[in-house]
Amino acid sequence: MENEENKKPVEGGEKKDGYHQVFNLEMDRRSALKRFAGGLFSATAAVTTACSVTASDEKKEKSNMDWDEYFKGNYKEMTKDERLATVDRLEKMYTERTGKNVNISEKGEVENTLFGYAFNVSKCQGYMDCVTACVTENNQDRDSEMQYIRIHEIEDGKGFQFNEADDNYYHEVPNEGHFYMGTQCFHCEDAPCTKVCPVEATWQEEDGIVVIDYDWCIGCRYCMAACPYDGRRFNWTQPHVPEEEVNTDQHYLGNRLRKKGVMEKCTFCIQRSREGQNPACVEACPTGARTFGNLLDPNSELRYILENKKVFRLKEDLGTEPKFWYYTD
């Protein structure tokens, strides 16, 4: 039987989403109690099993993990011990579900480091090896073909008119009379996306990486609307990654498996960059168009580019200070 509250007309004749759905629903007492009870059902079931004298030790342990996972706090506010316990719990839950092991890191900011990126427009030939590497490395949904990186094919003489660019080309590259530019999350120093989140599920770390706590995200998409660079993606459906293709080297704030209804984006491959490696896109680029490094290191290749090349950033007038520069040879 169809729920009566779903039959109610919505103001303006359109279905509302985001903040309205989460915080501004008009409900009578009965509906409110029903929604609250539904949200806590799994947690209540976990307590019942954990306290049962007939349940096996294995079931009790699983119920305890479900309970702790359901009521965990914002990762940003966790202590070191709480973070370690959280990743340990997620690893055990993955093993229990799949029979396989996964390594989830909670490694924090790299000291004396501010990550940045440079893109050589002269060298990019539109091959999209970077896109493929990013999808694989970061366990992105295969069904929706979600892609953090977009390569724009732009006709010579058009300037940086992204509204006239081809982002879904399926022909041999490079295409004569065109040039290519890649966009993704720019990890802005003054990131507007982090300011609009009503639950503080996204923030900037000390090493410059803008991250998301997927389990704290409510899917309102305010950050998506606030980003002037189209750098964020939303999971409209349950992400699907074939078990044999799952990258098991993960980071809690990076490429761990996500769920339906949350935001995600480029994290400069936090699981790699915080271990001293380049992001997957940099390693995969066949023409060397991508450079990643520490902006605070005067001897880094990135600093050399910024100091010796004519660099520019997109939409400088907005004052967002993206840590992603473009240049030409």
Image (spheres, rainbow, N blue to C red):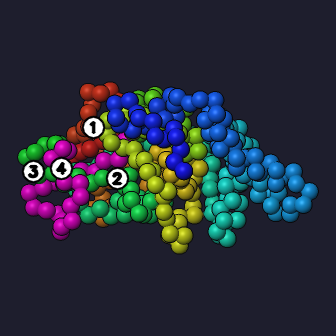
Q: Amino acid at mark 4?
A: Ala
Q: Residues within 10 Å of mark 1 (few under 14, many from 20)?
A: some
**Image position, residue 219 (x, y; %):** 49, 41
- The residue that appears at 51% across and 38% down in the rendered structure is 5
Q: Which residue is mark 2?
A: 149
Q: Is residue 84 above or below residue 206?
A: below
Cα separation, mark 2 vs mark 3, equals: 22 Å
Q: Earlier in the sequence, mark 2 or mark 4?
A: 2
Q: Amino acid at mark 1?
A: Arg
Q: Which residue is mark 1?
A: 313
Report if the CB atoms under discs 2 and 4 are less than 8 Å apart: no
Marks 4 and 1: which is nearer the front? Answer: 4
| Circle 2 SS class | loop
Pick out the residue farthest to the front: 1
Report if the CB atoms under discs 1 and 2 are less than 8 Å apart: no
**Image position, residue 173 (x, y; %):** 18, 65
Mark identifier at residue 156:
3
The reply, left or right, for residue 137 in relation to residue 57 is left
**Image position, residue 303 (x, y; %):** 36, 42
Q: Which residue is mark 4?
A: 165
Cα separation, mark 1 vs mark 2, equals: 17 Å
The magenta-colored residue range is 162-186
Report if the CB atoms under discs 1 and 3 are less than 8 Å apart: no
Cα separation, mark 1 vs mark 3, equals: 19 Å
Q: Residues within 10 Å of mark 2 (few under 14, many from 20)?
A: many
Q: Amino acid at mark 3?
A: Asp
Q: Earlier in the sequence, mark 3 or mark 4?
A: 3
